[in-house]
Amino acid sequence: MLPRIEQPLPPTPHSHHTSVSGNSDLVGATSQIYLPEVIYLGVTAPTRNRTELHIFKQHCLFLLQNRTEKHICHPLTELQTITPHIGAFNKFFWKYHTSITINGILEDYRGITHHSDTRTPCLVKVCMIFYSWDNPSYTVTLA
């Protein structure tokens, strides 16, 4: 059985503002929630403290609503919104897919690499992280 969504949803621990130079800066806590609809690129899989995990799960419940499942995919081509030089992120983690179901949340992380013959960027499985609705911990499965 799914937990109830808190009303209103817990606030995220960040606020954004635009600096004089026009750049968007992050203000507040140094942590991140890493919501499913936002791309993730990093040298490791993300971690969440207890509060962040709670906010993350509540947000995922909101996305699920009355459905039995919701899938969010981030193809590697989305990285081109950040840079045209995908090869610069060789061996970085990329959150490729998030599945939200009545059983929990499954995040699929891939490593950025390239085909040896064509030097074309590609993804290889690295790990999957499962978050149960009724457990404050998570399970990591390595590829």
Image (tube, rainbow, N blue to C red):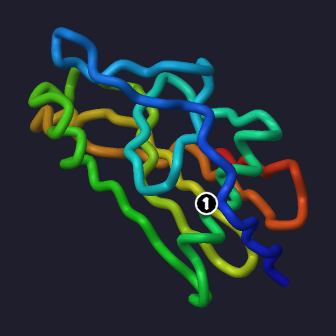
Left or right? Give the position of 107 relative to 102. left
Q: In this rendering, is residue 36 above or below 33?
A: below
Q: Position of residue 77 (x, y in %)?
A: 19, 48
Q: Identify the image quadrant of residue 33.
A: top right
State the image coordinates of residue 126 (x, y, percent, origin top left): 53, 42
Residue at 34%, 45% in the rendered image: 123
Q: Residue type at mark 1?
A: His
For image coordinates 46% across by 72% down, the residue present is 71
Residue at the far right: name it: 135
Whether residue 40 can be seen here: yes
Residue receiving disc 1:
59
What is the secondary structure assignment of the residue under circle 1?
A: helix
Q: What residue is shown at x 17% (from left), y 10% (from top)? A: 21
Which residue is more in the foreground, 51 or 68? 51
Q: Quadrant of residue 102?
A: bottom right
| For residue 53, side relative to residue 70 (left or right) | right
Q: Quick check: 83 above or below 21?
A: below
Instruction: From the top left corner, tell me how far across and down residue 94 is, in percent.
Output: 41, 40
Position of residue 6 in the picture relative to residue 93 (left or right)? right
Residue 19 percent location from the top left of the image: 27, 14
Q: Quadrant of the N terminus?
A: bottom right
Judge by depth and name the residue closer to the eye, 139 or 20. 20
Above or below, 20 relative to 78:
above
Q: Can residue 45 be seen in this snapshot?
A: no
Q: Residues within 10 Å of mark 1 (few under 14, many from 20)?
A: many
Q: Is 59 rendered above or below residue 5?
A: above
Q: Is residue 74 left or right of residue 142?
A: left
Residue at 61% x, 64% y: name it: 60
**Number of callouts:** 1
